[in-house]
Image (cartoon, helix red, strand yellow):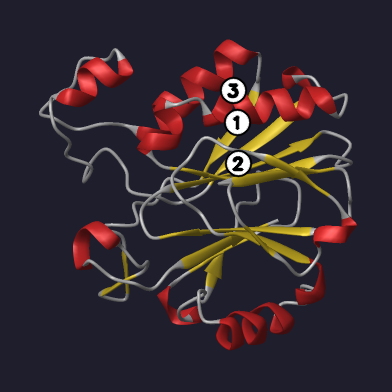
Amino acid sequence: MKYISSSKFPFRHLTTTKLAGDMKNEQNRNDFLISENFDVQKLVLANQTHSNKIKIVDKMDAGKIIDGCDGFVTKETDLNLGIFTADCMPILMTSKDAKVKAAIHAGWKGLAFGIIENTMDKFLQLGVYPYELVVYIAPHIRKCCYEVSKEFEKIFSVELNKNKFDLSQFARDRMGKCGVRHVYEYKLCSNCCKHNGEYLFFSYRRDGCDERLLTVI
């Protein structure tokens, strides 16, 4: 199992597993994507910094790794957008007509400082309202394994149960407040999920690893 995708999210996408290897390695990444019929010359990636910054990209950005952002929105239907993770939450979004799409890297810092709201603003700039979006939350570290400090209660205005924080529920609540109505999740935890007795995903919290997964649309 080199990747997974959700049948409930009706646009082509995938998240790699450990069996696909380290997606930060360019040759490995290109070999894998070509084998899955993705055009690597039309892939846009980011030098992610756990920020809340989102950029609108176009065909001039094809094949680039963009500095200074943690996600993209585009109206170029043939661009592929990719996000690296090893516990943080990858979120994919598209308009229902698939003419505008986004990929964002949503760790706790990005969520705390408004990466969801910033993405909504970029869609509005391109003429798409939140209620017109279909959203997919890909595998990430889930509440079962995400133990955090009590400081999170102040940062997110939540009450923690056994110091566990639910990234996807917080994201869903934020999106709901913005007007998003259609959200799908693949409810696998990057920290503890196993397949055939082996961990399925890279996890920074579990292993302190440098390797990364790729979620692409």
User: Mark 2 packing: few (<14 Cα in 10 Å), some, or many (20+)?
Assistant: many
Mark 1 or mark 3: name the one nearer the start of the chain: 3
Judge from the rendering whether residue 2 lies leftward or rightward of residue 216; answer left or right: left
Report the residue marked by disc 1: 183
Report the residue marked by disc 3: 117
**Position above or below: 29 against 144:** below
User: Mark 3 packing: few (<14 Cα in 10 Å), some, or many (20+)?
Assistant: some
Mark 2 or mark 1: name the one nearer the start of the chain: 2
Which of the numbered marks, if any, corresponds to residue 113? none
Tag 2 secondary structure: strand
For the C terminus, which image quadrant?
bottom right
Amino acid carrying label 3: it is Glu
Amino acid carrying label 2: it is Tyr
> Measured from the top left, where is residue 199 in percent x and y?
29, 70
The reply to whether discs 2 and 1 touch (Cβ–Cβ < 8 Å) is: yes
Q: Quadrant of residue 206?
A: bottom left
Report the residue at 66% width, 13% height from top: 179
> Measured from the top left, where is residue 17 in percent x and y?
46, 70
Report the front residue among 96 and 100.
100
> Measured from the top left, where is residue 171 in percent x and y?
47, 28
The reply to whether discs 3 and 2 touch (Cβ–Cβ < 8 Å) is: no
> Measured from the top left, where is residue 94 in percent x and y?
76, 39
Amino acid carrying label 1: it is Val
Report the residue marked by disc 2: 136
